Amino acid sequence: YPNIKISIMGQGGSGKSATVIKFVQNHFVEEYDPTIEDSYRKQLKVNEKIYMLDILDTAGCEYYWGMRAQYIKETNIFILLYSITDKSSLQLLKDQEYRDILRGVVEEQEYSIIVVGNKQDLENEREVATKEGEEFAEEIGAYFVESSAKTDDLVPLFEKIVTFHLDG
Ligand code: GDP
Ligand code: MG
């Protein structure tokens, strides 16, 4: 099957691992070691075609060393994830993670960026308005979505993400 490499980046605690594990294994993790960096594989059918997704769940922000550097270079879809309950997590994407992508993508493959506002279920703790996430995504030409690793089925989310990547 055609392979699509995805890297998920963003501030620790914003829900990267919970999002990846919910999508791949269909359960919500309440606690996950924030230092674990791992990659996952899952087949996904999009528009009647099956793709093999390789997903790197990053931890920390040293994107340039060892195996990870190579993976980042070959990434087709970058998911920049923040938590709607934490302003600083969106700020980190603006200040750091997006710039890092541009610096790290030295090979000329086509790539897409998706901005995900996670923890949408925690509406009463919201610190980031939907519009702020939308505006950042628009600035960088990214697709934008809010979601919840806790309460959402994330298969439709990844279908949308891959569709956006394939259709541009
Ligand atoms: P990471 O450091 O970005 O990988 O963050 P984790 O996936 O480890 O999540 C950090 C904490 O937030 C954990 O306690 C998760 O259970 C919790 N969490 C992650 N996503 C959500 C979500 O969508 N809703 C809620 N309520 N909690 C979440
Ligand atoms: Mg994690």
Image: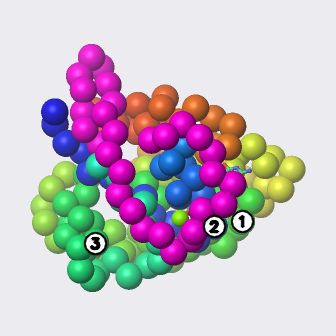
Q: CA distance from mark 1 to mark 2?
A: 10 Å
- Residues under numbered marks 1 and 2 in contact, where contact means CB atoms less than 8 Å apart: yes
In the image: residue 55, left or right of residue 3: right
In the image: residue 113, left or right of residue 90: left
Mark number, residue 68? 3
Mark number, residue 86? 1
The three-letter code of the residue at mark 2 reads Gly
Closer to the observer: label 1 or label 3? 3
Residue shown at 16% from the left, 36% from the top: 2
Dot 2 lies on which element? loop
The answer to whether residue 100 is above or below residue 56 is: below
- Residues under numbered marks 3 and 2 in contact, where contact means CB atoms less than 8 Å apart: no
Crowd band around label 2 with a 10 angstrom C-alpha radius: few (<14), some (14–19), many (20+): some
Spot occupied by residue 168 in the image (x, y as percentages of width and height): 29, 38
Dot 3 lies on which element? helix
Q: Which residues are magenta?
A: 24-53
The answer to whether residue 78 is above or below residue 156 is: below
Residue 49 in magenta? yes
The three-letter code of the residue at mark 3 reads Arg
Mark number, residue 13? 2
